[in-house]
Amino acid sequence: IDVADIDGDGDQDILVASRFDDKISIYVNNTIHRSAIINGERIVATYKETRSVAAADLDNDGDMDLLSTSSHIVAWHENDGDRPPRFASHTIVDNLLAGRWVDTGDLDGDGDIDVLAADRDANTIWWFENRFNQSGAVTFTPHLVVNDALGVRDVHAADIDGDGDMDVYSASDTDNTIAWYENLDGRGTSFARHNVTQTAMYARSSYAADIDGDGRLDLMSASARDDRVAWYRNTGGGVWPEYTIINTADGAQFIYAADIDSDGDADLLAVSERDNTIAWLANRLRAGRGFDHYIVSNQAAGVHAAIASDMDGDGDLDIVAAVEYSDEIIWYESSGGYTPSFTAHVISAFADVAHGVFAADLDNDGDLDVLSASRADGKIAWYENRGGQYGIREARPQVSAGGQQLMVDMILSSRGRPGDPALELRALTLRFQTKDGRRLTGAQAAELFARIAIYRDNGDGAFNPAQDALAASETTFPLNNGEMTVSLPNLPTQAAASDRYFVAVEPKNSICAAENIRISVITNRRTAADITTGFPLLAEYMRDLDASGDPNFARKPALIINELMPDNVSTLEDPQEPGEYPDWFELYNTNDLYIDLGGMYLSDDPNNLRTHRIPDGVIIPPFGYLVFIADGEPEQGPLHTSFRLSKGGEPLVLFDIDERGNQVIDVVDFDSVPADVAFGRSPADAKVWIELKTPTPGRFNLDEPPTDFVFLPAIIYPGTCN
C-alpha cells in the first residue's frame, strides 16, 4: 500500500497491491478542492536589509519555524504552534558582512535540520549545526564550508553526488561561478569544492533538479551580465556539459525548478529584473526539442525572485513572486494543463524593495502560507492562506416584500473544480445583533419577529418570497449567545458553481422593526458537506472544522486609513486644546456594522507595531469616519496618539488586535506634504492617494472645494426604512 497523487489533482490517492486476487487497485481521492485567499500581513521581525527567508521545523515540534538572513544577522524565529502562530526571534549569528541567503538541510545526518548561509562580502559559506538532537534545545555551532566563493549570492543543500548525504552548492557573481561542495564524510566536517562553470557572468542564482530524468541532480543558473539561463548536466563522472536555454533574459536574476505543466519532468522558472519578466521554460527534452519559452508576466517591475507552489490545492503549481520596484508580493494562479495561463493576485503592496519569498504551512491548517523578505524596511512577514472549499458572500440590503424584511442576501460558491462532487447546504447558523454589536437574546428576537425564513433564489437575483423557493422557516428563536442554527433540506450546489439565498424576517409590528438589527451567517462544520460522502466542508476563513467560535473572526476588519494631514497649521483645531493645530488622520469604516477599535494599534514605525494602542471603548460607526489627533499626547483623550506625523513623510500603519495576530489592516507610506494640505484617497478611485484641495476631517473626501451647499428633501422609497 502507498499513497501518491495518481490523478494529478492535488490530493493523495491510495495505491494497493493485493496478493490473493493478484490485483493492483487505485482508490481515487475525490475531495472537493479549495480556494486560496492570501492576505493579512503579519510582521515577524525587522533587521537591516533582510534579503532571504525560509521555513523548516528546527525544534522538531511539528510546526514550521522561520529563518532569515539580513546584512549581518542570520536568525531563526520559533513558531509557538498557536492559531495564528506567533514567532520568537533568536539570533544564530550576528557578524556577517553582507548576508545574502539562508537555506536548510541535514548536513551532518543526525536527523535534525541545520542552517546554511551565504556572506557575499566575506566570500564565505557557513553551515550552522543544529544541536537539538544532542542537547534537546536548538543551539547552533558554526562550520565554514568555503571562504573563496567570490561574491557568493545564494547557497543550497542537496545530494548532488547521490551518496545519501547532503552536499552544498552555490552561485557567486564576482568569479562568475556555479560550484558544488562535496560532503566528504557525510557529517559536514569537510567539503571538497567542484566548479561546474566559471562563465555564468555575474551569477545571481542557482538551483538543483533532475532536468533530464536520469536520476541525478543537475544544476542550473541565472546570470545577469550575459542575460542567460543555463543548465548543467550531471553525468556522474565530474563532467558537467553546459546548455544555454535562453540568453535574452535581460538581467537574469533568479532560477527555480518545478513541474509547472504536470507532465512529470522538471520545468524551469526564471525571472529577469531589467525586463520585468517572470517566465517558465517548459522541459521538452523527452520530445527532443529542448525548452519552450512561456511568459507568466512581463509587468513585474524589477522582479527579484519567484517560486512555484500549489497555493490553492488544485493540483497544479502556482507561482509566488517578490516584485522589487513595486514593493509587491504577488501570487499567480495557474489554470492548469500543458500550457497554463496565470492570473495575478496581489498579496501585499507594502514589501518595501521585496527580495525573497517562500511558501510553507506556517499555521498547520493544511494549506500553504506565504513568507516574504523585503530589503528597504528589513521586514520578515507572513501572509495567512484563508482559502476554503466553499465561500459565502453576504450583503444586507434594505428591501422588503410580502410583509417580510430581507436581512441577508447570501451567495454560496463552491470552490471545487469541474468534476468534483457537489456540496450540499445543510444548515445556517445565524447571529442576531444590534448595529453596535450587542447580541440579542431569544426573548428579544421573539419580541421583534414572528418568523424567520430562508429562501433559495429562483435565478433572477431579486428577493421575491412569492416566487423564490422556501427552504426553511422558524417561528421560535432559541438563541444561544445570540445565535441559532436553522436546518436545511441538503440543498445542492454544483462544483465551481454558485447559488443565492435570502434570509428574511417577518416583523411583529412595523416592517422597520428590523432596521437596527443585523443578522449574519456564521460558518461551521454543520454548514455544508460533500454530497457524496457527507463529510463536512471547510469554509473560507475557517481555520479547521473543529475550531470553536466565529470563523469569520479571522477576517480583516473593514477599515481603511482615509485621509491625513502631517503639517496642520490652521485647518483643524485641537478640540481639547483650543488654539493648537496638531497633525491628524482619519479612519473610515467601509461596512454596515459598528467596529470596536479597542486593542488595535497605530504606528508610524512598521518595526514597532505597538507604538500606540487604541484604548478600549473606541468604536467607529457603520460607514463612519473617526479622526485621530497625532500630537504625541495620549493623556488628552482616547483619540490622541502617542506619536506625531512627520511632515517630511513616513509610513502610517493600522495593526489588528493581538487575538488576530496583529495583521496589517491598512498602511499608507506618504511623502512630504505642504502645510495645511490633506493627503487622502481620491473620491474617484479609493485606491489612489492624492493631495486634496479641501481637507475633510470626519467627512467624505473632496477633490475640489465646494462652491455652495444644497439641501435636498429626503426621498422615501416604498417598502424601505429610512
Image: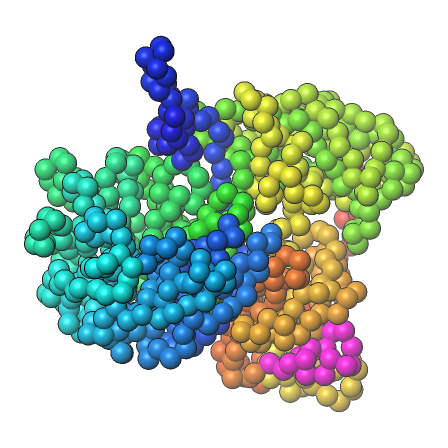
The residue shown at (50%, 24%) is 421
In percent of width and height, residue 333 lies at 39, 45
Task: Locate residue 484, reporting x and y percent.
Answer: 78, 35
> What x and y, as percent, mark residue 376?
41, 74
379, above or below 715, in the image: below
Q: Main secondary structure of the magenta part?
A: loop
Position of the N terminus, as image quadrant, is top left
Q: Is residue 426 visible?
A: yes
Query: With respect to residue 221, does 466 lie above or below?
Result: above
Where 219 falls versus 513 (above or below)? below
Report the magenta residues as a range.
Answer: 630-645
Seen from the viewer's position, the closer of residues 433 and 104 is 104
Direction from residue 526 to residue 285 in the image, left or right: left
Q: Nearer the viewer, residue 566 or 121?
A: 121
Q: How many marks?
A: 0
In the image, 439: left or right of 176?
Answer: right
The colouring scheme, among rainbow, by chain, secondary structure or one colour, is rainbow
Q: For the point 59% across and 38% down, which residue is it?
A: 539
Write down the quadrant of residue 721 in the picture: top right
Give the image quarter of residue 372: bottom left
| Residue 473 as seen in the image, left or right of residue 422 | right
Residue 721: tell me if it is visible: no
Residue 473 falls in which quadrant of the image?
Answer: top right
The question of residue 560 being in magenta is answered with no
| Point 36% across, 39% down: residue | 316
Instruction: In the rendered view, tell whether residue 348 sits above or below residue 678.
Output: above
Q: Position of residue 563 (x, y in %)?
A: 61, 70
